[in-house]
Amino acid sequence: AQTVTQSQPEMSVQEAETVTLSCTYDTSESDYYLFWYKQPPSRQMILVIRQEAYKQQNATENRFSVNFQKAAKSFSLKISDSQLGDAAMYFCAYRGYQKVTFGTGTKLQVIP
Amino acid sequence: DTAVSQTPKYLVTQMGNDKSIKCEQNLGHDTMYWYKQDSKKFLKIMFSYNNKELIINETVPNRFSPKSPDKAHLNLHINSLELGDSAVYFCASSQLGAGEKLFFGSGTQLSVL
């Protein structure tokens, strides 16, 4: 079974600074995708970024980028120029063919 | 237009009651899911349906019964509610396939008193 581990229950960052959220996963599958989802206090789940396992190039979406290390099974999220609106729970997720497995989440606080 | 809508948003009920949560998606997706988010924010899959067929059934008490009348709808019925059932329940949909992202509903916060 696939497992996803987020070892940082809480993180904080100063506004305009950069923060990195960690995620590791375990799988025996060769074809899979990785995601970061954001859940603000509104409870809505919002996709932040997606990475295909077969691509070596790290995904980037504006201020959000990932550091994908396939051999190490590591998938960290970097948020640059942090904004107050980035404060939320962040979930790392693994998707094989059928199922999406989520990590336990990291609560990000942005300090003005 | 809401892509994945679930009702109700909030549900407060007594132990032992039976309740249902409804979910509808207008995205034309083949696959729908129910996730449970507990008080520690952990998201765990409960069920998944593809074209009205059950494809994932995690270890969930049989008091929980999903029903998919068509591929746009996936409802969750819960019998004999217990205190431990209190959680936020999310419906989601996607196309079937490893790269497809999940589209989530806004969640139903269930409180069992």
Image (tube, rainbow, N blue to C red):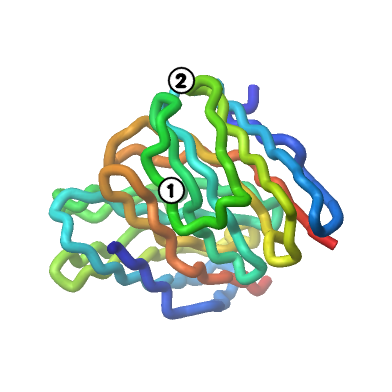
At mark 2, the secondary structure is loop
Amino acid found under the numbered disc labelled 1: Asn
Q: How many marks?
A: 2
Cβ atoms at labels 1 and 2 below 8 Å apart:
no
Vertical position of residue A11 compared to residue A56: above or below: below
| Front of the two marks 1 and 2 | 1
* Residue at image point 62% right, 71% down: B40
In the shown orientation, is residue A56 left or right of residue B75? left
Crowding at dot 1, Cα within 10 Å, few <14 / some 14-19 / many 20+, comes out as: few
- Which chain is home to disc 2? B
Q: Position of residue B83 (x, y in %)?
A: 75, 65
Q: CA distance from mark 1 to mark 2?
A: 22 Å
In the shown orientation, is residue B77 left or right of residue B96? right
**Quarter of the image with the N terminus of chain B in it:** top right
- Residue assigned mark 2: B28
In the shown orientation, is residue A7 left or right of residue A25? right
- Residue assigned mark 1: B57
- Which chain is home to disc 1? B
At mark 1, the secondary structure is strand
Q: Mark 1 or 2 closer to N-term? A: 2
Q: Position of residue A53 (x, y in %)?
A: 20, 52
